[in-house]
Amino acid sequence: MRGIIGVFFSLMMLFPLWGVSEERILSGREIMEKVFNRYDGDDAYFKIEMALVDKKGNTRSRILEVYTKDYGELMKSYLEFLKPPDIRGVKFLSWENKDKDDTQYLYLPALGRARRIVSSQKNLRFVNTDFTYEDMQRRHPDKDTHTLLGGEIYQGYSCFVVESIPKKGTSQYSKRIFWVDKERFLVLKTEFYDKKGKKCKIFRVEKIEEISGIWTATRTVMEDLARHHKTLMNVVEVKYNQGTEDEIFTLSNLEKD
Amino acid sequence: MRYLLFPILRKISLLFFVFLCAGRVQAQEERVSKIRNTLEAIEKKIEWEKEGWIKIFSWWNEKDNPYQEPVTLYSQLHFKNKIHLGDNLNLHFSLDAIYENTLHTEDIEDVDILVNEAYLCWKMGGGRFYLGNQYISWGKLDNVILLDRINPYNYKYFILFKKQERKLPIFMLRYNWHQKNYDGEVLLIPFFKPSYLKFFGSDWAVFGHLKKTIEEGSYSSQVKETIKAVDVTREDKLDKYIPKNFQGAVKLRSRIKDIDFDVYYMYIYNRLPTLKEKKDKSNTVKKFLYLPTEENLTALLSQNLSPEELKLIEDFPRLHILGIDFETVAGPYGIRGEVGLFLSCPYLRRDFSYVRKDTLSLGVGIDHTAENNFYWNFQFIEDIILNYEELFSQEEFSHQVTLNLSKQFFYGDLILDLDSSYRISYHDWMLNPQVSYKLEKGVVFSLGGYIFEGSATTLFGRYSDNDLVYFKVIYNF
């Protein structure tokens, strides 16, 4: 399946006008299914420079590594902070589960062991970034009702604009609006609306690159509109399909030095 | 307090002088550059990860007796290293430079440079071997962790340092492995290492300044001579590297549905000693030490014990420990628990004779983080002594609760914390409020305090004279 999707992407590169016809054919749900099923490697490694910027422009930098691996339809991911020294060694492990919340663990060096954390508390911020634990999880299209609002050019890319309204009790947001690149089925922008219907956050992709044949967002911004706070992420290293060992995604690996 | 500022600053300057003493060597330029070049050459050849922190921790308490230290300064430089020696082989080691000063009239200073962790890690197939001085963190609870029994602890300052900071590394061979449905870990510990505990001569010693109070008080020479001869010794065999001191433990971890659990077996020495009479079968020495009344002093003197009979022996019995822990989530709450059966735990009877009893300990904890970054963690611990008979300071059923509250502000830069523990059965308790602020460069300042309350024979009540405020600076590099 992954291989077929890979070929599919190659065809997209050869026929850039293909998206025009797709706009007429695809429904909002189909678009979001294509986004969810887009081939992004069987496993992946990212080294990311993260900057937290407050409303006064004060910036705090962090460097982290992320490993992901597909296990059938489900994915496991591992994240470790390398810098700065005060959060170095903080690690996060997440296992997707079918039809229920992810199983998540956090390792804090001061505690000396991994700790199970509550993934159902979706609205909590992940280590003081502008990402909540919900934002850290992949969201299956079945959890939302999708409506295609139309098309729009965003930063030079022709995009589908899709509104996704969560099914009851599955999200901290009342709705999300996605700008999806018609050629690559890559989300380039997301607007998040809180329970009162007010726009509360914007996620923007500022740069995409094709790495090992996979289109990758290498520079992104998540902006919290209420707090006037931003989390910038710059991917400085990407490796796909390196045959990442299963051991990376275990509790014992999380707890090792 | 103002008069204390100068000596504190003087000592801090001295501390940095100690830490930076390597800088003085710069005068011998040739030697330094040689060392530097060698290190750089080594560093180019091998992958060397370095990190560490500097901590300056000072606390003040009210002087309730003439021997109490009103101000203590504790500074530590921790330097942690990981060297990749090969594809599957790493060397881990950390060094500590510790400078302590009580700022007391006697101006006692203490500087130590210690090798902390030092072990080799060799990855082989689906497992890893570790050999050397290491830390182990077992169990799932917080603060009171029933099954975290492998490493000894440093109780020099009782509980002023957090649990992980108090831990002492221990030499062992460790092997852990990962299978699809379970993980395992086996430890072989060839040598005995007890927890560090002082019995006399400090604010945090088990018997505080009792000996000094008698020696320098208006007592007869017979009393002074007797108390001076009171001592605590350790059996020789424990300090020897002999097979008899061998210890071992195993842990298996798995998962059923949404519950993570571990099963443990440990055959180890109890890390905390119980005092055993050497020859004094009347136990008057122990009785006086634990309950230092005039009546007990008279009883002790009436025995006319020889210096040898005035000695007590630290006993560290071997324990068989069977345990199980679990962790899961239920809605927005984290839930965890531990159960441990400890065979042959040492206790003192009411007449201060020594006895061993099996003990069952249970603990359950629940925690929750609210939307506004308010975190709470509540634990309930129950100890049950099996085949109970009347004991000096332990009830058959002991209940304890702990509560931790924490609230973060400004994206985690400002943190208000409250740690507390209440031993319901003994009515003694501890409070540790703290406010911390993190600067942009990673320097964290903390201001806090400890309050201990309870009767003189209880865990926290014993230190009720030691209520204190503290200031702490930590810089990670």
Image: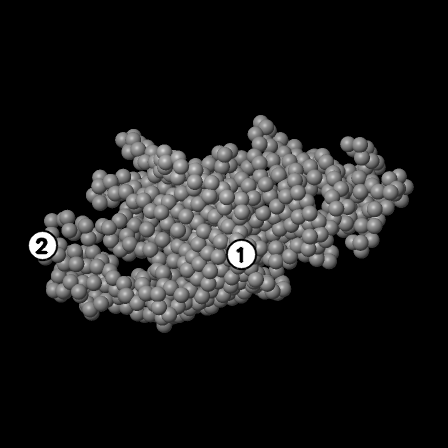
Residue hosting label 1: B89
Q: Position of residue B304 (x, y in %)?
A: 12, 64
Task: Return the residue found at the far top.
Answer: A56
**Residue closest to the eye, A207 or A236:** A236
Q: Position of residue A132 (x, y in %)?
A: 63, 43
**Residue closest to the eye, B73 or A202:** B73
Q: Nearer the viewer, mark 2 or mark 1?
A: 1
Residue hosting label 2: B221
Q: Is residue B230 left or right of residue B17?
A: left
Q: Helix or strand or loop: what does disc 1 sit on? A: strand
Looking at the image, can residue B147 be seen?
no
Instruction: State the image quarter where residue A218 is shown.
Output: top right
Looking at the image, can residue B65 be seen?
yes
Q: Is residue A101 above or below residue B321?
A: above
For label 2, count other residues whose C-alpha is less than 10 Å away and answer few (under 14), some (14-19) or many (20+). few
Q: Is residue A120 above or below residue A234?
A: below
Quadrant containing the N terminus of chain B is top left
Q: Position of residue A26 (x, y in %)?
A: 86, 45
Q: Position of residue B397 (x, y in %)?
A: 38, 64
Q: Is residue B413 left or right of residue B242?
A: right
